[in-house]
């Protein structure tokens, strides 16, 4: 792969972009309480001469600028929230907020979009149309995109196309991953409550052992993907938490299983939901227990539109050349999916694996997460090339 061709105006503000990322990294805020982050962003966008709206979707910020002539409205989105993780890394700009950390790259997403906004705001006379810079709260499970949509972020003016990116430590610096169709999974949550009959551990025949029943459930649930989903397709059923029991010699009367379902096809998602219902009912009948399934649909599939994906690939190619590739896929979910259900767009990945460390040693959502800050320049450059290509 060739060395990325950073846009010259991005290269000129490299220190500012990196300093912005570090400033935000030191001050992470959780979903829907990104007040200081939003205030800083609003001040920066205002200084660029943009029309700024705050409090969209609770704590979201939107900057809008119009070019010199009529044309489409393009939206670019960055997410703002951190995660409830205590940072254990040793960087000089580590989190100053105990128990909260930017462990997924959202600090970089904001820095890249602010950098691109600064450059693009000086190009108004070259552009025909308008750009909305969307800084969205609560991507990490809160569904901030849905709240912003409900409050009209895609209207006034009406957005024609929307784009989002994600720093991606599963790909090396200098690469960009993009594809049409599904790029991230549907991500749902379930809770299974097993109610049996408790009693003394020495007389199990008088009880209905909720722990034994829950153990059967954990095992049987793993057969949903292995025996009901086409092995050439991707799906996940994970039980991530088990709560129950009172003491070593007490047979439990209740156990709660919490888990997640991920799928790349809606039909597979529905198959899993149906099998969860059938299995819980069957196991309840087998053991004479009461089993309650609470299934909560989360983020939908993130599905890229073909035309907009090609536009991203062209813009990315201007920056990383032959580094544009098929993305490293995971079963992660993204609330950018809500935007893509409303209007055409594309969500893509910017390779950010630290060049000085072994691959995959700093995965997303870990307490020592970090990324190659040179990837920030790649992301900002792609934003600029994309907007110029769409509006010039």
Image (tube, grey):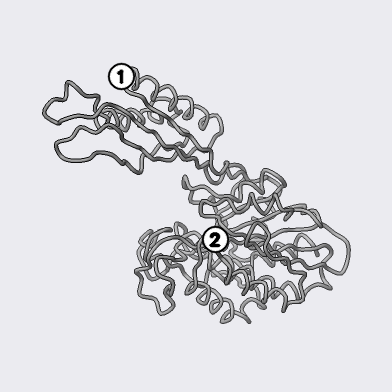
Q: Residue furthest front?
A: 199
Q: Which quadrant of the structure image shows residue 354?
A: bottom left
Residue 220 percent across, percent down from the top left: 33, 27
Q: Position of residue 361 (x, y in %)?
A: 35, 61
Between the C-alphas of marks 2 and 1, the distance is: 52 Å
- Name the residue located 46 percent from the left edge and 29 percent from the top edge: 272
Q: Is residue 100 above or below residue 325?
A: below
Hey, which residue is sitting farthest left in the picture?
202
User: Which quadrant would residue 148 be assigned to in this image?
Assistant: bottom right
Residue density around tag 2, few if under 14, some if 14–19, many if 20 or more, within 10 Å: many
- Please tell me in which quadrant of the rendered image residue 20 appears: bottom right
**Residue 270, numbered circle:** none
Q: Percent position (x, y) of residue 177?
A: 55, 54
Q: Nearer the viewer, mark 2 or mark 1?
A: 1
Judge left or right: residue 253 versus residue 260.
left
Mark 1 Cα within 10 Å, few/some/many (few <14, many 20+)? some
Q: Residue at x 29, y 27 (%)?
A: 196
SS at mark 2?
strand
From this view, report whether residue 299 is shown above or below residue 148: above
Q: Is residue 263 left or right of residue 197?
A: right
Closer to us: 82 or 293: 293
Q: Earlier in the sequence, mark 2 or mark 1?
A: 1
Q: Nearer the viewer, residue 171 or 44?
A: 44
Give the residue number, with chain letter if any, for mark 2: 350
Identify the secondary structure beneath mark 1. loop
The residue beneath circle 1 is 288
């Amino acid at each position: 792969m060739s060395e990325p061709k950073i846009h010259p105006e991005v290269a000129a503000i490299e220190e500012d972009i990196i300093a912005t990322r570090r400033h935000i990294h030191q001050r992470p805020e959780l979903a829907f309480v990104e007040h200081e982050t939003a205030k800083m962003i609003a001040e920066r966008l205002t200084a660029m001469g943009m029309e700024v709206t705050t409090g969209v979707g609770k704590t979201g910020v939107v900057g809008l600028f119009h070019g010199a002539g009529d044309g489409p409205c393009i939206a670019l989105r960055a997410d703002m929230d951190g995660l409830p993780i205590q940072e254990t890394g040793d960087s000089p700009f580590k989190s100053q907020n105990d128990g909260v950390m930017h462990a997924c790259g959202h600090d970089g997403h904001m820095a890249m979009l602010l950098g691109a906004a600064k450059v693009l705001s000086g190009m108004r006379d070259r552009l025909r149309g308008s750009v909305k810079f969307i800084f969205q709260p609560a991507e990490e499970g809160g569904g901030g995109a849905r709240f912003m949509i409900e409050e009209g972020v895609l209207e006034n003016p009406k957005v024609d196309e929307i784009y989002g990116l994600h720093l991606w430590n599963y790909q090396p610096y200098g690469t960009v991953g993009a594809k049409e169709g599904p790029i991230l999974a549907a991500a749902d949550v379930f809770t299974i409550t097993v109610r049996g009959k408790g009693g003394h551990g020495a007389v199990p025949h008088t009880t209905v052992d909720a722990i034994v029943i829950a153990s059967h459930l954990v095992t049987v649930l793993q057969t949903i993907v292995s025996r009901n989903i086409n092995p050439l397709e991707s799906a996940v059923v994970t039980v991530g938490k088990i709560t129950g029991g009172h003491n070593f010699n007490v047979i439990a009367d209740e156990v709660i299983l919490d888990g997640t379902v991920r799928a790349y096809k809606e039909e597979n998602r529905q198959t899993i939901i149906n099998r969860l219902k059938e299995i819980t009912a069957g196991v309840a009948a087998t053991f004479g227990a009461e089993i309650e399934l609470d299934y909560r649909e989360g983020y939908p599939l993130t599905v890229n539109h073909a035309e907009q994906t090609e536009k991203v690939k062209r813009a990315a190619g201007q920056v990383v050349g032959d580094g544009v590739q098929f993305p490293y896929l995971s079963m992660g979910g993204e609330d950018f999916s809500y935007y893509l259900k409303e209007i055409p767009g594309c969500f893509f990945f910017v390779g950010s694996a630290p060049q000085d460390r072994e691959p995959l040693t700093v995965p997303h959502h870990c307490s020592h997460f970090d990324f190659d800050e040179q990837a920030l320049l790649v992301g900002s450059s792609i934003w600029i090339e994309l907007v110029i290509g769409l509006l010039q």
